[in-house]
Image (cartoon, grey):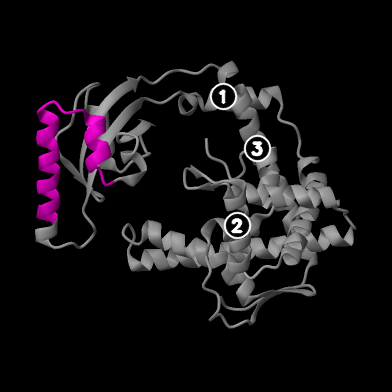
Amino acid sequence: MKSKLRSASDYLLKFLLAFIVIVFIAGYTSLSCVVNKTIAKINDDIILQTDYERVSNPVIEQLKSNYSDKMSKEELDKKISEIKKELLDQMIDQKLLLQEAKRRSFKVSKREIENGIETVKERFKKNGEKPLSPTEAEAEFNAELRRQNYTMSQFKDKIQDDLMINKLIELEIISKTPKVSEQELKDYYDKNKDKLDEPEKVSVRHILIRVEKNVSIKEKSQALNKIKEVQKKLKSGEDFAKIAEEYSEDTGSAKDGGDLGFIIKGMMVKNFEDVSFKTQVGEISDIFETEFGYHIIKIDAKKAKQKRTFEQVKEDLEKYLRSEKNQEQYEKYIKSLREKANISISDI
């Protein structure tokens, strides 16, 4: 049950340090060659090319990384164009919200700013799955500030602005969103019972030998030979988890013995999914191929589809429908701010 906003608290989080967090997570640093022109004017405020690139470049690079081998160049270019427009619209909305928060003189305490900084610092307490010491985490945070050309003073100002926006959102959106009634919950449940069922699940381990896109026939043959050697070891009775840890080229799961946990339909590429749901518990599949390379899987467990009662899903439904109402209220409020604003946009 996917929503643009998952709950009231998530709604606030969407705006809390929104653009700072995007930049810090992505770690994009190459901004030195950007021409610093104005690309949007919102009343008396402007959005500079450098500010826009700071937000958009990491998102676009991630998009290219994820979809360059799944979309045609035309499709990817169209998607990038759509994302760029969406990001600029979000930045314009951010400006409008901040302008309104300042006009209404919302106050932010020193303690609130310190808590906001700690919220961002939390994201530096791990390097992947590896926990960092407080000293290491602080060093990473400060290094990222330098890479993004933020002084601590500028960063605090940004935190203050975002917290002012949060106060405005709490007052004008969260507090004014109508409550979800019991009847609304029951009506939604009755119309969507099948979608709310607990889906069929399978617990999967896999071994992957990667085959990169456009490799030579020789390289593909070498990968196939490698997975065949792995298969021989499995057929001789060697432990799947140990073999996965040693040979699998899926670094995310290899360290866990190839364990992907429970998957449901729609989570994986089709061929992987088809083999997973056809293979019986305790069985090891034959070699099969996906766009990522050659796989062998083992099924550890299966869970059949299960009906869920209204009481079982009521809490989640309330959060979901509340978030939908929050979204409607937000869009209505932003529309009202845009209608009163003087906005001009250059090509991006």
Q: Read off the residue under disc 3.
A: 7
**Mark 2 or 3, closer to the camera:** 2
Q: Quadrant of residue 105?
A: bottom right
The magenta segment? 220-249
Please state which amino acid type lies under the numbered disc 2. Answer: Ala
- Judged from the image, the secondary structure of the residue bearing numbered disc 1 is helix
What is the number of the mark on residue 98?
A: none
Spatial separation of the CA atoms under disc 1 and disc 3: 18 Å
Q: Is residue 184 left or right of residue 189?
A: right
Residue at point 80% right, 48% down? Answer: 112
What is the number of the mark on residue 139?
A: 2
Q: Is residue 16 left or right of residue 214?
A: right
Q: In this orientation, which residue lies closer to the viewer: 165 or 208?
A: 208
Q: In this orientation, which residue lies closer to the viewer: 163 or 28?
A: 28
Residue at point 55% right, 55% down? Answer: 25
* Main SS, magenta residues: helix
- Measured as percent of width and height from the top left, residue 143 is found at 59, 63
Q: Work out which quarter of the rendered image holds the C terminus and state it.
A: bottom right
